[in-house]
Amino acid sequence: MSDPIRVDRRTTLKWLAAGLSFSAYHGQALAGSAPAAKGYGTDPDLNHAQATWHRVMTARERLQTALLADLILPGTDTAPAPSALGVHEFIDEWVSAPYPDQVRDLGVIRAGLASIDQEAVRRYGHDFVSITDADRHALLDAIAAPVGDKAGAEAQAGHRFFKTLRGLVVGAYFTTDVGMKDIGYLGNVALAAFPPATEEMLAIIDRECKALGV
Amino acid sequence: MGIPVAAIRGAVLTRPHNGRPACLYATACGRGCSIAANFQSTTVLLPVAQATGNLDTRTNALVYRVDVGTDGKARGVSYVDRVTGQHHSVRAKVVVLSAGACESARILLNSKSAQHPNGLANSSGLVGKYLMDTVGSSTTAYFPALEKLPGRNDDGISMAHIYVPWWGLQAQARKELDFARGYHIEIGGGQSMPSLNAAAMHAKLCETSYGPDLRKQLRQKYGSVVSLTGRGEMIPNEDSYCQLDPKVKDKWGNPVLRFHWKWGEHELKQASHMRKTFLELIHRLGGVPLEGTETDGAKAISTGGEIIHEVGTARMGSSAKDSVVNQFGQSWDASNLFVMDGAVMVSSPDKNPTETILALTWRSSVYLAEQAKLGAL
């Protein structure tokens, strides 16, 4: 891959807003963390929403992110790879936003991308974008395995980068229409009546409860 | 564990009613129901009021003061148009504040006059005091047994499907619990619409860290995570209140509120009881707790204001000395001033406060109409 897909900002911002509103809905401290509005006491104009930040990832970081995303959740015969859905574009929008969680993730992602590039050069003499898929797998394996509390700071940081990136990749992927279908979400369809649990489901619940002794 | 479970009651129509259609079991209720199958004052109450021809609505009007006549009674309100920045005053025979508990208190405190030097309706000094929120604590867990279920639409009415009402009254009567008052549990999860956080959380459950198997395992685990959410009663206390900030003003120059907050012992113990109950429930059902495992009440409890059920601040009562308004929301200090929102509540049960606010407002409105007819206001 040389030139990953570009997605317009209207789309990535909407995608981002959906991710953020989930956090807000569950009270995870979004409130109060937004950048100060001009003058205390008025609401943003949501009918004419505008991004108040610029996207910060370099073209190289976006390409690295796209490659890593496709390794984390490869496409199948029936489902496209993350890069085909623009997941790397979502991640760029995410780490560019000025809220505390996003600023934190920017630090983790940017350092991780730089580190994996350096490691590629050290091991294979070329940067991450230029090495083979097999070599990229080897680099990913090195940070994917869980690390213990006694591991060094570098190993801790590597695994933290992996977990942060994986969370964003699967989060972005499965909040697209394509991803929702792929994971098996069957809801959000208009129904005249909501169907009760089937006999099959009730039998499974009964069986599982018996197995648990409840 | 002796915990009862009931089908949840939602203010959602399952059959057409008064020109409103039945729910179509799609789209998220929390983002507003454009067909009005779900109750909202904007789509269910206001259109009916507008149809009478007796209602004028002025939008973008931020009321910051109730104006007072020389007789000490309410004369109208002053507001700033948040679009133009222009200030306006409107006259009224009766003023009803329904701005929400904190904002109603802010307007009253900001309505200082020679007759009401501490703010309007505040001769008792109680405006802003005894602010309450709901006690909150939740635990999220993974239940392997749920992986056995086939794919299904779990949306329903876009909220919890089942509900646990407070079951501890008898235990409290037997003095087996170390806290007063109770809580309910809301249960969420299943194969709901994927969200960023939920997808990331599911990935942590997978044995495979990445690659083709990650996708397979995510599909398998999808719908096996359930959250147990406790919502409990807070006992009002003297340390939880709001007052006008002496320094910070909004962009139109009006003082904002500053808040003081302290959970009492009962709330902290209640939050601890919630967590311990959730963990035992999860254990008995073969689940694995993922988030919300701390059982120390101070660490388990929500931040004051987080559950956004703020009530209190203009409590009702039977005398001008120990309350702000009477049982009809009528100010003791200015008989043509009413408060009709969560501000008047002197206690806050574990249930969401909206229906109590609606019921009290209905009662107050009937009283207001009767008094107006008698010429008593």
Image (spheres, coloured by chain):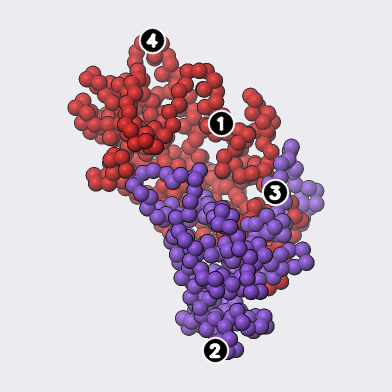
Chain colours: A purple, B red
Residue assigned mark 2: A122
- Which kind of residue does numbered mark 4 sit on? Leu
- Which kind of residue does numbered mark 3 sit on? Gly
Which image quarter: residue A82?
Answer: bottom right
- Which kind of residue does numbered mark 1 sit on? Thr
Label 4 close to label 2 by CB (< 8 Å): no
Q: Point out residue A159 in the picture as x, y percentages from the top left corner.
A: 54, 76
Which image quarter: residue A15?
Answer: bottom right
**Residue situated furthest top in the rendering:** B374
Q: Secondary structure at mark 1?
A: helix
Q: Secondary structure at mark 2?
A: helix
Name the mark nearer the viewer: 4 or 2. 2
Q: Point out residue B9 in the picture as x, y percentages from the top left corner.
A: 61, 38
Q: Point out residue B22 in the picture as x, y percentages from the top left corner.
A: 68, 33
Name the mark nearer the viewer: 3 or 2. 2
Of B162 and B83, the residue lying toward us: B83
